[in-house]
Image (tube, rainbow, N blue to C red):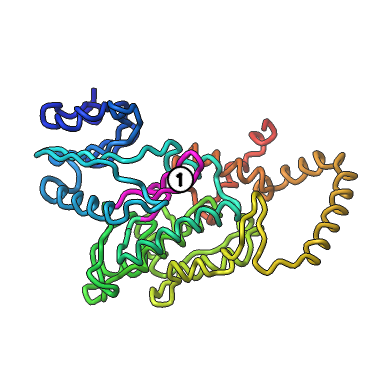
Amino acid sequence: MTRAEELPDVASAREFYAKYEPKEIIGTGASSTVRRCVRRTTSKEYAVKIIDLIGNGELVGEDLRTVTHNEIKILRMVSGEMHIIELVDVFETETLMFLVFELLHKGELFDYLTEVVKFNEKQTRQTMRALLETVAFLHQQNIVHRDLKPENILLDDDKQIHLSDFGFAVALEHDRQQLRQLCGTPGYMSPEMLKCAINELNPGYGKEVDMWASGVIMYTLLAGVPPFWHRKQMVMFRRIMEGNYSFPSPDWDDISSCAKDIIIKLLEVDPDKRLTAKGALNHPFFQHVEDGNRYFSQGFNPRKKFRVAIWTVLAGVVVSKLSQNVKKTMCVIIGKDPYSSKAIRKLIDASSFSVYGHWVKKRADQNRAMLFKNHLCFNKF
């Protein structure tokens, strides 16, 4: 049994074990292990994050204890917020800390995204609205998360998001306080945070870093790949600081200009010009009201909708007459350029992730369509 699989010493954490029964491991980190656990009196399931204060992580001992105390403090400050994970219990010993959270069975948004490859605009609107409402709440409390990413967004049974992992979060002393610590995940770091690491005279950063990360998340949801990824981290950092990204064809051909516009305003290099959380929620992309499975813009025009319905019916008649040629047409399209078909493109994207284990950026040097350039393999397919 490996160190990660071993249960902590019962004697040093008697209070936790008296209340909860730990089960299988559901996640691991540099200095922690997450297990499913069951409350003995109610049989209700939870997730417990067991933090090893004398482990081999980047932070050990009192440093790690201080960071964890800060996380607990912030989680208690935001307790009860709909889209933030709920901290249920805390136990602390000389060598271990136990943080008991609500158990969210659907896991990380990242894992779900790898299954579906990308979101449509409706799914993106729902997810990003919930995320931005949560960020707006945090910023109103002068809290900066500093590590927003799909891996730190968990899903419940209804696929509602719950923001987690507040280990890098900080409560500002005042609204305009500037920070300088380099922290978070490289692909989601903002230009102003990176500049702090290379320029001692840089004034620092504030809440705006969360908005940049939100833009990276939204781009990734819609495209299935992050905007700045590169296998060489220094190249990726340079792209981030320059705001060097694009909306390449064909992935972005069927995505609205409205969606692209809000991403552009979130991925604004100048933090003073970047959208705030409230400003983003007021963007036209979010000015829709959900009614079941339908969306209506606030400027609803019944005459225009009727004309669209008529044209839709007529188009359906034409499509039905041409249905006998669909298979033949698809074979021709796929044979010439498999990546031009949205359905096949989605299959390629999913397959490439399972092969490489990470996102593959569709640039000249890393085009996933190249996987299907071997005509002999394609003919077998």
How many discs mark residues in the rendered view? 1
Q: Residue at x 16, y 48 (%)?
A: 64
348 or 95: which is nearer to us? 95
Q: In which quarter of the view is residue 235 placed?
A: bottom left
Residue span colored magenta = 148-166
7 lies left or right of 84: left
Residue 281 in picture, x, y percent from top left: 50, 66
Q: Amino acid at mark 1?
A: Leu
- x, y percentage for residue 251? 61, 55
Give x and y (percent) for residue 328: 82, 40
Q: Residue furthest front?
A: 41
Q: Is residue 58 above or below residue 115?
A: below
- Nearer-the-camera pick, 66 or 253: 66
Q: Position of residue 164 (x, y in %)?
A: 35, 49
Q: Is residue 173 left or right of residue 274?
A: left
The residue pinned by badge 1 equals 109
Relative to 60, residue 238 above or below: below
Q: Which residue is painted at 75% across and 67% down in the image?
A: 301
Is 151 magenta? The answer is: yes
Image quadrant of residue 186?
Answer: bottom left
Give whichever of 336, 166 is nearer the camera.
166
Q: Is residue 203 above or below residue 104?
A: below
| Structural crowding at the residue carrying mark 1, measured as other residues with C-alpha within 10 Å and reported as few (<14), some (14–19) or many (≥20) | many
Tell me the element at label 1. Answer: helix
Does residue 52 belong to the magenta stretch? no
Q: Residue at x 34, y 60 (%)?
A: 234
Give the residue at x 45% y 43%: 155
Q: Quadrant of the C terminus?
A: top right
